[in-house]
Amino acid sequence: MRSMSLLLLSGIMLAGLIQPARAQQPPASPGIYVVTYFEVDPATARKSEGLLRQFAAATRKEDGNGELTLLHEIGRPGRFAIVEAWRDKAALDAHGAAMKALGDKLQPVFASPFDARQFLPLAVAPAQASADIGRSVYVLTHADVFPAGKDEVAAMVKQLADDSRKDPGTQRFDAVVWDGHANHFHLIEAWSDRAARQAHALADHTRQFRAKLVPFEGALYDERLYEAIK
């Protein structure tokens, strides 16, 4: 009987020492996106890029930051955009002081100050690796539709994102919706080069989406091309 008790005790102690391995939790997906547009004196574009690079390097180290992409509009040397992704609103709010400091530094050269919009994920997927990111073409598109059609358009946008990720040369195709304005959609795209982006624009699924969208549009389809600032 004593042998049996010792055996049971040993088994309990051993079980306490050997714990099942816990699965590693994946990092949380960004819960909020921000796209900030602004314009500076074109003559100061290079200096502005330097300030933006410093800002980006610091921001990427902040708690809760999931993305910081700097963009320079193609053909418009004074126009920039900043794409950010954050874990949650608390992380974004903590970043507010850094954003204000950047605005203060750029204030003397602003042609148009920061215009920042917060977005919630609608159809977001991990970006694909690029062999030559220097040739990548980024596209930011804003689609404003009548409120009555927002749900139908949301389904159309999701389908467009799914179809577009299968196009040759796609590196990223994300759809987000303006927080508090469910009838405003933003597309964030990246393509391997201009040829890939042009092929996508002429693809059947893109043409069909654009044709179906027209009756819902509350404003012109605003599509702008960018290059990344490294």
Image (cartoon, rainbow, N blue to C red):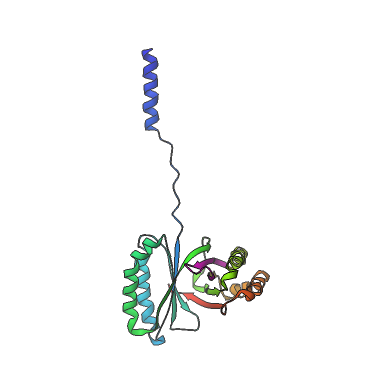
From this view, report whether residue 168 is shown above or below residue 51. above
Q: Position of residue 114 (x, y in %)?
A: 40, 77
From this view, report whether residue 11 is shown above or below residue 193. above
Q: Is residue 178 left or right of residue 8?
A: right
Q: Position of residue 31 (x, y in %)?
A: 45, 60
**Residue 179 part of the magenta segment:** yes
Q: Quadrant of residue 141?
A: bottom right
Q: Position of residue 27 (x, y in %)?
A: 44, 54
For the point 36% across and 81% down, the residue is: 47
Q: Is residue 178 left or right of residue 158?
A: left
Q: Quadrant of the C terminus?
A: bottom left
- Between 194 and 206, the one lying in front of the other is 206
Q: Quadrant of residue 200?
A: bottom right
Q: Can residue 128 be seen in this snapshot?
A: no
For the point 63% across and 76% down, the residue is: 214
Count the numbered circles shown. Answer: 0
**Residue 78 part of the magenta segment:** no
From this view, report whether residue 81 is shown above or below residue 159. below
- Between 114 and 229, the one lying in front of the other is 114
Q: Position of residue 198 (x, y in %)?
A: 61, 75
Magenta residues, dominant SS class:
strand
Magenta range: 170-184
